[in-house]
Image: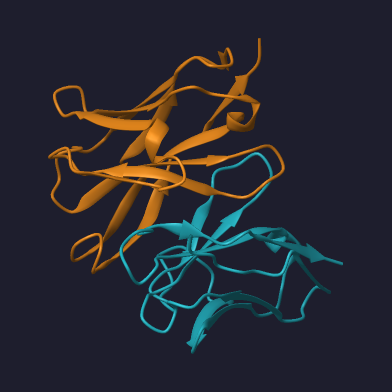
Chain colours: A orange, B cyan
Amino acid sequence: QLQLQESGPGLVKPSETLSLTCTVSGGSISSSSYYWGWIRQPPGKGLEWIGSIYYSGSTYYNPSLKSRVTISVDTSKNQFSLKLSSVTAADTAVYYCARSIGEGTVTTGYWYFDLWGRGTLVTVSS
Amino acid sequence: SYELTQPPSVSVSPGQTARITCSGDALPKQYAYWYQQKPGQAPVLVIYKDSERPSGIPERFSGSSSGTTVTLTISGVQAEDEADYYCQSADSSGTYPWVFGGGTKLTVL
């Protein structure tokens, strides 16, 4: 059964870059049927989509975060990664990686998250 | 930006029916999805494509769509259904292919 696991530092200093990796096990990240995404949830608040990537490297980012976000994929390691630059306390959140399934193109089809990692808390503090 | 609007909270007694709404301008053209999130846990998909139920999700969970509003209905609510529920969809321009509603806290009285 496919599983996703987030990993990375739990504490990041303000103005630095947050870096997380999601390792996919029990299946291939190179499947043409899925996108792979990052979602975050500040303490006590709702879910926010950060961005998504296809195994070929095509990316889609939340416009509100686009200037600070980079998502990449390493198919040889069955991993995809998130980098968020110039972080502030407002970026403190649980960060989830997730698999997205759907049909059609991202902009004209439909896509949703059917499998999630357990999440990892990242705190931005000096 | 594109927004999906949910009520912050809904309360029902055990055995009653809970209805959680989600409103958005693009919902007549875009499918909606619903996730259940219990404290300290990752979200779990409970409804996809407006009204389809994933394997393993109890039949008491159902979804419907009407115009700019979609509704998650939980019939015969049980104590274990107490959780936060989030809708998810997309805007019509492709700028926001994944967007979440603000979430609704379901309290079982």
Residue at 52%, 75% in the rendered image: B24
Question: For the view shown, which residue lies furthest in the right direction?
Answer: B109
Report the label total.
Answer: 0
The quadrant of the rendering that contains the C terminus of chain B is: bottom right
Q: Position of residue B70 (x, y in %)?
A: 53, 80
Residue A41 quadrant? top right
Residue at 12%, 40% in the rendered image: A56
Residue at 60%, 24% in the rendered image: A88
| Image position of A8 (left or right of B58) | left
Q: Position of residue B86 (x, y in %)?
A: 58, 61
Asked if residue B82 can be seen in this view, the reply is: yes
Q: Position of residue A78 (x, y in %)?
A: 22, 28
Residue at 15%, 45% in the rendered image: A31
* Residue A66 vertical placement versus B58 (above, below): above
| Image position of A102 (left or right of B28) | left
Along the line of sight, the residue nearer the viewer: B63 or A26: B63
Residue B6 quadrant? bottom right
* Residue B109 vertical placement versus B27 (above, below): above
Residue A30 quadrant? top left
Asked if residue A117 can be seen in this view, the reply is: no
Along the line of sight, the residue nearer the viewer: A94 or A51: A51
Question: For the view shown, which residue lies furthest in the bottom direction?
Answer: B66
| Image position of A43 (left or right of A22) | right
* Residue B32 vertical placement versus A15 (above, below): below
Q: Position of residue A6 (x, y in %)?
A: 43, 27
* Residue B55 vertical placement versus B77 (above, below): above
Question: For the view shown, which residue lies furthest in the top direction?
Answer: A126
